[in-house]
Amino acid sequence: MPKRIILFDTTLRDGEQSPGASLTVAEKLIIARQLANLGVDVIEAGFPIASEGDFEAVKQIAQNIKGPAICGLARTHEADIDRCWEAVKYAIKPRIHTFIATSSIHLEKKLRMTQTEVVELAHKAVRFARERCPDVEFSPEDCARTSLDYMCEVVQAALEAGATTINIPDTVGYAEPEEFAGRIRYLIEKVPAIRQAVISVHCHNDLGNAVANSLAAVMAGATQIEGCINGIGERAGNAALEEIIMNLVTRKDFFNVEVGVNTREIFKTSRLVSNLTGLGIPRNKAVVGQNAFSHEAGIHQHGVLSSRQTYEIMTPEEVGWEGENLVIGKHSGKHAVAALLEAEGFRLDPDQLNQITNKVKELADKQKQVAEDDILAIARDITMQLPEEEQYIRLEEFTVTTGSGLTPTASVRLIVAGEKKIGAAIGDGPIDAISNAIWSIIGPSLQLVDYNLKAITGGTNALADVSIKLADQKGHLFSARAVDEDVIKASALGIVKGINKAFRSEQKIHSQAV
Ligand code: KIV
Ligand code: ZN
């Protein structure tokens, strides 16, 4: 009988820690709903003590999303665990995930605690969590760099306190597949009580081994894998959940395990996460990249035309990939736009759909046809807009003067916290001038650290797609994106969106431990 592998999605917790990827509560709810459609078993919805926003997102997901277990993260402090329980308790299947670091370097340099103190704290925290919640996961953070015997001691203590899942994280992406599998085998051999619990793994991708390490652990006896859609996450990210799923499904002959997901929802989920986080997907990314199912080379095309199996080990349909660049003209209506965006994972309310359709039609009037990439850019622009009441600043008006022999000069009128503010500046070019004019109002608390401009499709009347990154004084990054036919306006709107994001998450404390 094949074993059932539990898929634990942490896109909304560990994934959201990707630099610049912060999501609103509403966006997290949309992603959680799609993760439930995909059929993951557990959604780690956030870190409730980290901020009001995280708490609210976990709570709303627990209240509204049926199917998967809903999990929240907590350090071993009682206040963290209580806050986590307050958020997850509404779920039909709530879970508390508590963690403490166990590697010598973390004990000495970060926690300044002895091994015995950490064992005691882990035991106490799990027991405290179990008094509230029947499902408790425990993680010895940085486990892949923890001595094997000390790992066993901590895990034994967590099991005695009632942990139902023991998660083995490779927090810094240090392990090699055979070594990591050996660690799981060692644990099973030395801590027999673990057979009553679920053995989970959580791998980061610093050396590019996250998926391989997770799969090696399955072969060694792990039955839960943690990961993020598109492999997003801090630094090089977490194990890409869609790659794990397709390995287990495509190579069932090898792994002999079952998963409970609907693989046809993968593509939609991937695009939704990319659209809402603003983190693009490399074209050659396994399973969900744009090139994953295209065959350029003549010899491959010939083979695929004779029999798809010559070069395809899985079909585009299996992962829900719905075809190539569809073109929309000015006579295509709302339904065509809605169908296209639905297939790309967008969940739109009627007002957003109207705004997008109107903008697409405006563009089609000028360009005759609007390509899919343009429509996606417009949809991203509109859906990533914060609701008006959450916008700290708004761009009201701007003028830019430039020309040969003239110094580019810009003036802007912004509404900042309800008040009109005017700024003016010169710059090396018109975009630099408008950016300087905005900063003359906002001040030095934020800095533009990255600016990228792309013409999406078409000729000189193409849409300009601007993505920017801002950094605050603590080094937190905030990314934003805006599109417009006017490249200067797109740039100003991108900066304004980034500033809004930064101000919104000002209070957010991310624990330095995760
Ligand atoms: O990478 C890590 O160790 C974590 C833990 C909280 C599981 O994210
Ligand atoms: Zn992690």
Image (cartoon, rainbow, N blue to C red):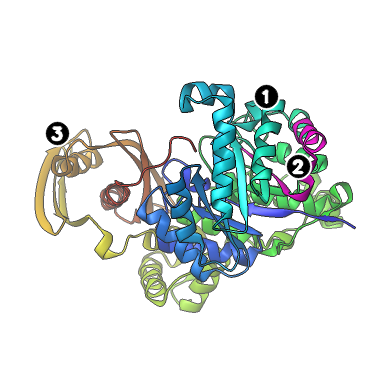
- Residue under the point 50% across and 78% down: 335
The three-letter amino acid code for the residue at tag 2 is: Leu
First in sequence: mark 3 vs mark 2 = 2
First in sequence: mark 1 vs mark 3 = 1
Between tags 3 and 2, which lies in front? 2
Ligand 2 within 8 Å, label 3 CB = no
> Residue 317 location, x and y as percent?
72, 63
Q: Nearer the viewer, residue 490 or 439?
A: 439
Quarter of the figure with residue 25: bottom left
- Residue under the point 54% across and 50% down: 128
**Marks 1 and 2, how far apart in space?**
22 Å
The three-letter amino acid code for the residue at tag 3 is: Gly
- Residue under the point 41% across and 42% down: 510
Which mark identifies residue 455? Answer: none
The local secondary structure at tag 2 comes to helix
The local secondary structure at tag 1 comes to loop
Q: Taking the image as drawn, is residue 326 in sight?
A: no
Q: Nearer the viewer, residue 169 or 85?
A: 85
The number of discs equals: 3
